[in-house]
Image: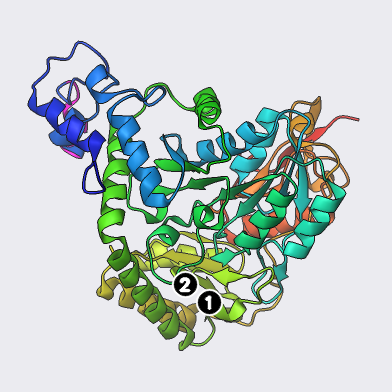
Amino acid sequence: MDQRHAPIYEALEKHRSDRIVHFDVPGHKGGRGNKELTDFLGEKCLRADVNSMKPLDNLNHPVSVIKDAQQLAAEAFGANSCFFVVNGTTAAVQAMVMSSCKAGEKIIMPRNVHISAINALILSGAIPVYIDPGINNRLGIALGMSTDDIKKGIEENPDARAILVNNPTYYGICSNLREIVELAHSHNMLVLVDEAHGTHFYFGDDMPVSAMEAGADMASVSMHKTGGSLTQSSLLLCGENVNCDYVRQIIGLTQTTSASYLLLTSLDLARKNLSLNGREIFRKTVEFAEYARREINSLGGYYAFSKELVDYDSVYDFDVTKLSINTRDTGLAGIEVYDILRDDYGIQVEFGDLGNILAIVSAGDRAMEIERLISALYEIKRLYSREPKGMLDHNYINPEVVYTPQKAFYSEKKIMPLRDSKGRVSGEFVMAYPPGIPVLAPGERITGEIIDYIAYAKEKGSLLMGTQDMRMENILVVEG
């Protein structure tokens, strides 16, 4: 079997042609039980929404078509083994951490990780050793991990079990993965890569190095972000140093036992498409992104940043498919531009923070849509720009960690107004989503700077979440 095959898709097509009578779940019975749902999604889609059965294999114990599909994916990505994940890359990140570190064991990681990584610490009891990422003061964003900082972290924590790396970050910043892997392995530590935004590194030309090529031990890959599969479908890639049977058991702790065959098939077909056509797909993606970047920079007021940021340290490389745009010189926060684009121009970008927006570009876009985005940004600048006074200039605040995330999350807590919580220790998360990087995590000291940041983000329209209080006016703090 080679990359031209899609085993799950082929088995599902055969199953549908066999006209099996279903006395199993799901209860919609191929859509016949819910006409409105069938009209919305289509009969073909509903008939493919089936349960695990012998001809279609079982994700939690794959022995046939799912096993074959995962092996093809491993070969395509240059991994020793691969797991299909249908609980999103959140589940893949958590499986990496939980299979590498037990309760009380240390893991070195940047603080600007996705919330899924810190949630994994709460679930596992692993202890984080945070490496503060570099900060670009003009853009206000956290950068990658400096190898000097990692060396220091290893020297001070020689008993750490693993190092977790974001590569690339949401903005496209890449760390020196090869050197990080060499450092970690020389100290008997595993390297785990949150590669949620790096699917294309495996298939495009002149891309930053992928986790598997760099020799990392595990990588979580959001196929649905830039790989073309359905939302919530992901891959967990493993190298040869990993006990993949143990990893499968760990995945089973949090992943559903009722895996969606729509998601599984989308992973299978996306892998096939990337294997056969990925080079051309990402050539076109880069072409679109580079054109848009040049045109947006010519407008003035905006800064669509790219490889000029590379310093071979905390910015070792840059993902040019990422159309990251700083908006501060227009006097508008990124989230304000995000809202105007959607509400006034019918354009939905990936996210807006306090100083930037991110537009995800792919070969599925059309030239006219790229032009529409450029024109809308020009109009927004013309109509809404103002002096950039009183704007916050950063999206990352170095935390003061008092307790481990698990200890703080499960401690006795009390609720109090956020505005009065300065000096207390948070018992819950505060984050803007997207990108899902916590402003405040359980166990971290609440400072005046953090309180002001949250108030400013709310005022500008950021979607803040994580606290029990949906209005983000009160916060749970650790007692004592």
Q: Is residue 183 above or below residue 71?
A: below
Decide if residue 363 is on the left or right side of residue 377. left
Q: Main secondary structure of the magenta part?
A: helix
The answer to whether residue 333 is visible is no
Which label is found at residue 320?
Answer: 2
Q: Give the distance between the C-alpha atoms of the residues marked 2 and 1, in whole angstroms.
A: 6 Å
Residue behind mark 1: 306
Q: Is residue 96 above or below residue 407?
A: below
Give the image quarter of residue 406: top right
Residue 472 appears at what percent x and percent y?
A: 66, 43
Q: Residues within 10 Å of mark 1 (few under 14, many from 20)?
A: many
Residue numbers of the magenta segment: 33-40
Residue 346 appears at what percent x and percent y?
A: 34, 64
Q: Secondary structure at mark 1?
A: loop
- Judge by depth and name the residue closer to the eye, 464 or 255: 255
Q: Residue at x 58, y 66 (%)?
A: 173
Q: Is residue 222 above or below residue 139?
A: above
Amino acid at circle 2: Val
Q: Secondary structure at mark 2?
A: loop
The N terminus sits in image quarter: top left
- Judge by depth and name the residue closer to the eye, 465 or 298: 298
